[in-house]
Image (cartoon, rainbow, N blue to C red):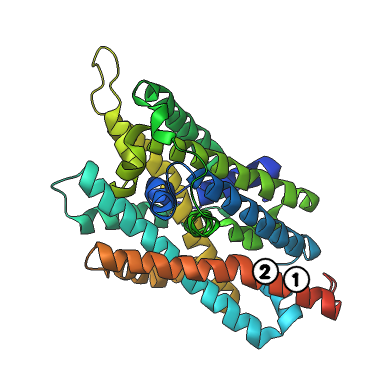
């Protein structure tokens, strides 16, 4: 059976907005209230989230300008023009490592959380490999089809999450948000750093930007795509503090899921809302993981021209699984997350800005 191919191999602004938003809304949102609350006081973390969002938008615009400058070329092609081919090969090889580490982290996270909340008796290894097999199936098909899955899944995920917030208003205590504005500037900055790590992933536009039907819309798509998660993170954080208090949110591993557990639906016809929330949430984590895997494939098939996409999948998949299962406990898993976050800052912020500056200084255009 052959792979279905879309006649239209380009994407519009709406698809790119959903793609960026889906990439940002992943596992990070489940822990965001705890991480931001740990760095700030009371409910002041909202300022950290807004600051992180503003920085992310700025970095996203830099990425968009770089993509627009070479909209007819792939990232590897214009990196070769800007910094020479040997340097570009090293950069894209490292980016491939970053994205399959990202994929491994998401796989392990979904397996760990699924075991904790859904599949208590199922071995974590089985959950992880099952999820990875579904991701492999997704990335084996059309790249445009994978991007368009975001348009299908993201509205459903956001709708269920907003329904969860609406149903939890009854247990929301406004007094938990007080006092206001008591965090120091340093604490706000530390909170923004934690929030930034949950906003990484927009750098996939470096690789998907060449698929844009109208390249001039890339910057607008990037801004809207980042704005959706920022607003969503603000809502999740405020509700996390309002329901559990600052001390509670700071000590709960996954505040977003615990909010769903607190919901009591009238009539008791549905007792475990967190199960519905988490199953729906798996859709966006699936999209995030699939796109990370796909970008990793783009990196290595660009480097090794004779290697087919399927061969690359067969090589990378066992590595992703082994890396994901390597952490022995939560502390080691957190270290893996920190490593990915630092690499993300490098590849989402430092690298695009450096390439754009070099391109302008050297006068390198899309025509070479």
Tell me where residue 135 appears, x and y as whole percent.
40, 54
Specify whether 156 is left or right of 51. Answer: left
| Front residue (pair 324, 293) | 324
Residue at the (84%, 80%) spot, across then down: 362
Secondary structure, mark 2, is helix
Specify whether 283 is left or right of 69. Answer: left
Specify whether 115 is left or right of 304. Answer: left
The image quadrant of residue 358 is bottom right
Tally of numbered tags: 2
- Residue 196 visible in the current orientation: yes
Residue under pointer 2: 352
Residue at the (58%, 83%) spot, across then down: 90
Q: Quadrant of the C terminus?
A: bottom right
Marks 1,2: beta carbons within 8 A: yes
Tell me where residue 310 appears, x and y as whole percent.
46, 66
- Residue 313 visible in the current orientation: no
Secondary structure, mark 1, is helix
User: From the viewer's perspective, is residue 149 above or below residue 185?
Assistant: above
Tell me where residue 211 appears, x and y as whole percent.
69, 55
The image quadrant of residue 173 is top left
Tell me where residue 366 appears, x and y as whole percent.
82, 69
């Amino acid at each position: 059976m052959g792979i279905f191919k879309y006649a239209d191999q380009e994407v519009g602004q709406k698809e790119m907005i959903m793609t960026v938003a889906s990439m940002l809304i992943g596992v990070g949102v489940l822990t965001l209230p705890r991480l931001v609350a740990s760095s700030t006081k009371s409910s002041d973390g909202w300022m950290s989230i807004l600051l992180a969002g503003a920085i992310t938008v700025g970095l996203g615009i830099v990425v968009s300008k770089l993509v627009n400058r070479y909209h007819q070329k792939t990232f590897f092609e214009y990196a070769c023009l800007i910094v020479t081919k040997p340097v570009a090969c090293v950069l894209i090889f490292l980016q491939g490592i970053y994205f399959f580490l990202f994929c491994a982290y998401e796989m392990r996270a979904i397996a760990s959380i699924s075991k904790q909340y859904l599949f208590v008796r199922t071995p974590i290894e089985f959950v992880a490999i099952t999820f990875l097999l579904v991701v492999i199936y997704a990335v084996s098909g059309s790249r445009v089809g994978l991007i368009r899955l975001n348009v299908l899944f993201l509205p459903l995920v956001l709708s269920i999450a907003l329904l969860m917030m609406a149903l939890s208003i009854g247990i929301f205590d406004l007094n938990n948000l007080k006092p206001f504005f008591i965090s120091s500037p340093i604490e706000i900055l530390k909170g923004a750093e934690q929030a930034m790590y949950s906003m990484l992933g927009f750098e996939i536009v470096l690789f998907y930007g060449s698929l844009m039907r109208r390249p001039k819309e890339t910057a607008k798509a990037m801004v809207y795509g980042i704005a959706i998660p920022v607003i969503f993170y603000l809502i999740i954080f405020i509700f996390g503090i309002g329901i559990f208090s600052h001390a509670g949110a700071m000590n709960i591993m996954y505040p977003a899921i615990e909010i769903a557990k607190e919901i009591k639906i009238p009539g008791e016809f549905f007792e475990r809302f967190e199960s519905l929330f988490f199953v729906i949430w798996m859709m966006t984590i699936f999209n995030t993981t699939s796109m990370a895997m796909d970008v990793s494939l783009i990196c290595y098939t660009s480097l090794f021209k004779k290697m087919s996409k399927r061969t690359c999948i067969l090589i990378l998949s066992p590595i992703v699984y082994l890396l994901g299962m390597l952490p022995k406990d939560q502390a080691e898993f957190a270290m893996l997350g920190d490593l990915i976050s630092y690499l993300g800052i490098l590849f989402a912020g430092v690298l695009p800005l450096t390439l754009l500056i070099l391109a302008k200084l050297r006068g390198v255009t899309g025509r070479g």
